[in-house]
Image (tube, rainbow, N blue to C red):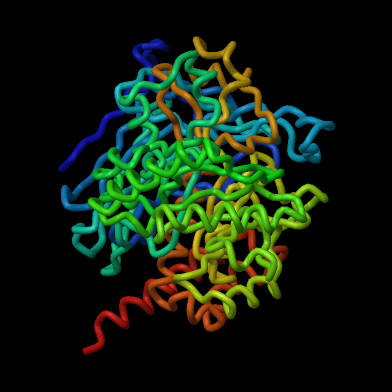
Amino acid sequence: MLLFSFLLSALAWPVRASDGKPPTLHPASAMVRIGGIGGTLPKAAKAWTMDMVRGESEGLQCAIVPGDGEALPVDRVNLTARDAEGPAVRLYRVVAVEHAAPPTEGMFIVPPRRLGQIPDVLMPLEGRAAAAQANPFKEGVAPLTYYIEFHAAAECKPGEFTYALEFETLRGKAELKIKIRVHAVTLPARLPFRTAVCWNWSLKDYYCHALTPEEKKVFWNFCLDYRLSPNAFFGKEPDPAPAELVDLGKRGLSLVCLMQVSGRTPRLLTEKQKEQFGPLLKQWRAELEKQNLVNAAVVLLADEPKAGSEEICQANAKWLKEQFPELKVWLATRPSKAWSESVDVFDVVTASSTDLYKAHSHDDPALAWWRTERPFPKGEYWLFHSVEPYAPYANVRLDNLPIEARVSGWQCAAIGADGYEYFWIADWSGNLEGKETAWPERAKQWKTGLSGAGTLCYPDEKMRPLPSLRLVNLRDGFEDWALLEQLLPRAEHADRRTWIEPVSKSLQEFSTDPEALLKARKRVIEQLEKRARRP
């Protein structure tokens, strides 16, 4: 028997007998918001069953609530695995941030929606002493909740594995029995589509110095833990650099952004810039060829370019391809005939809620035309989320429900996308004054900015990234998308409709019921298992 013991309080409360009622446990999928604004308290239960495939991570939450309405100290949490061959497990405390009103002027105006306590920060408990107290459940307040994450390695044997999550309190013990069913389906380290994120835009401001190589590696590997390829989208050189990609490529890196040529107002590359970038492009190509990552190389030609800049971009793209023939030229706008000669990858926001993204958002006819003009793999089509879109569309902001991040993967599968990118993962620069405050106290003063857009992780006391509930759901959505891709490749994406519709009928119509999503997912897994058993 394996025993994982997580100390939550070092004799923070005196040990004494109590005649009060024992606490109740309230398990739920990670897709549920437990308490806080827009949240609920799941039904009490003593057991939970979860399905997994090999090569993926999956998690659940469990809230602990006093049985007699009085605050109750939690002294210890014990997580026990009965079989050493089962999935690895980690335990986190779910911490709620206080979501304040977003800006009402400037480039982004975010509607004030679901303001108040929102459970989001996942604080790992290994080796951490943290006083914990279970409080009576109140509307709009987040109860004491834990996130239990399982990771089934690719070599994990199929079967059922049992775990026990035990809470010790002054009023006795409460135990949740967890059964994990690992199916004989395996996801690869590198998913069959691209998933990318910008990771270093404002970290220099938060760290108050340029990041060291070791600090960078922490972030690169953190991003890949959540199935996102780390890149510096807005720089003049790649970060990570091609020479640093050996280990990252083995972990599933799917994209290497070498540089950004321009933003919204493209200009012709000058002779001086060509003298500078020409040798670098050739050098980067040689490095990537050594690592079999040439086809992962992209250059961001322009970011939401203005109309009328097509000829400038076409000239820049022609020169880039002369230096690096296999290079994929990436443009953040909607496909059209005017752009087709110079662009290999179109990257569109899932939907526009304001005029800012109106010309750069998803459009079914534009995608259908692009598929005919440049079929995959020569032409690619990605989706991305930024501050937009707003409800009724799914997004991964704090004011969206956790399940919406996971639904995003199903929506990418529904349109047959070739990739997903998120514009920024760690915009911490507005929270410099709280650097010395420890979690969970830091959550009370954390500035949520644009409703959490651009912040999918949080800094711990040693400047290492902590995941968010939104980030784990986004990763789980990618892994669901990969299962759908295994079952029906995107060349056949029209045939996927019956598999996806229980989760999402359109970009505006999707289920917020975790059971509906898990049922649809299990149906895909079982079909993959049947296929594997055929002679």
User: x, y percentage for residue 415?
Assistant: 59, 71
In this picture, residue 116 sits left or right of residue 426: right
The one nearer the camera, 307 or 457, is 307
For the point 52% across and 47% down, the residue is 44
The one nearer the camera, 11 or 426, is 426
The vertical placement of 410 against 92, above or below, is below
For the point 60% across and 37% down, the residue is 454
Q: Which of the 4 image quadrants contains residue 483?
A: bottom left
Q: Give the mark count.
A: 0
The one nearer the camera, 531 or 198, is 198
Quadrant location of the N terminus in the rendered image: top left
Quadrant location of the C terminus in the rendered image: bottom left
Q: Residue furthest bottom?
A: 535
The vertical placement of 187 against 415, above or below, is above
The vertical placement of 344 against 77, above or below, is below
User: x, y percentage for residue 355?
Assistant: 82, 50
For the point 46% across and 51% down, the residue is 475
Residue 515 visible in the picture: no
User: x, y percentage for residue 273?
Assistant: 52, 38
In this picture, residue 143 sits left or right of residue 174: right
In this picture, residue 417 sits left or right of residue 504: left
